[in-house]
Image (tube, rainbow, N blue to C red):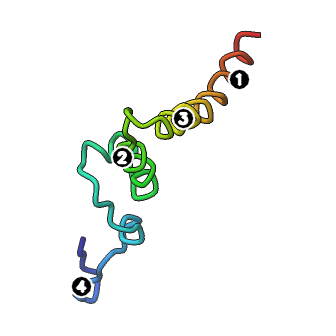
Amino acid sequence: MRTQDGDDEELELIQPEDFLPHNPFPTDAQRLGFDRWSGGGIDFAASLNGRKRSHRYVAITLLVVFATPLLFTVLSLLR
């Protein structure tokens, strides 16, 4: 955005977005909250193979790790 002041000089206004790193994700993914920090976890989870026993154990472990705080939060709200 450019504006002119009283001296007829063009000033370039700095926007907050100018300081943020470029987000390579599509607009739909950005609206869902995906950014460069969440991409690695999604890529890792997508690379798991359900036919391998060790990958199933990793998937179950990740499910427990991410679901436990949610479960505790819901239980505390119900009290």
Camera-nearest residue between 53 and 16: 53
Q: Earlier in the sequence, mark 4 or mark 1?
A: 4
* Side of 60 relative to 47 (left or right): right
Image height of 9 relative to 61, above or below: below
- State if disc 1 and disc 4 touch (CB < 8 Å): no
Give residue 72's mark: 1
Q: Position of residue 14 (x, y in %)?
A: 36, 74
The residue at which mark 2 appears reads as 47
Residue 78 placement: quadrant: top right
Quarter of the image with the N terminus in it: bottom left
Badge 2 amino acid: Ser
Badge 4 amino acid: Glu
Q: Position of residue 73 (x, y in %)?
A: 68, 24
The residue at which mark 3 appears reads as 57
SS assignment at label 4: strand
| Point 42% across, 71% down: residue | 19
- State if disc 4 and disc 2 touch (CB < 8 Å): no
Badge 3 amino acid: Tyr
**Residues under labels 2 and 1: Cα distance?**
29 Å
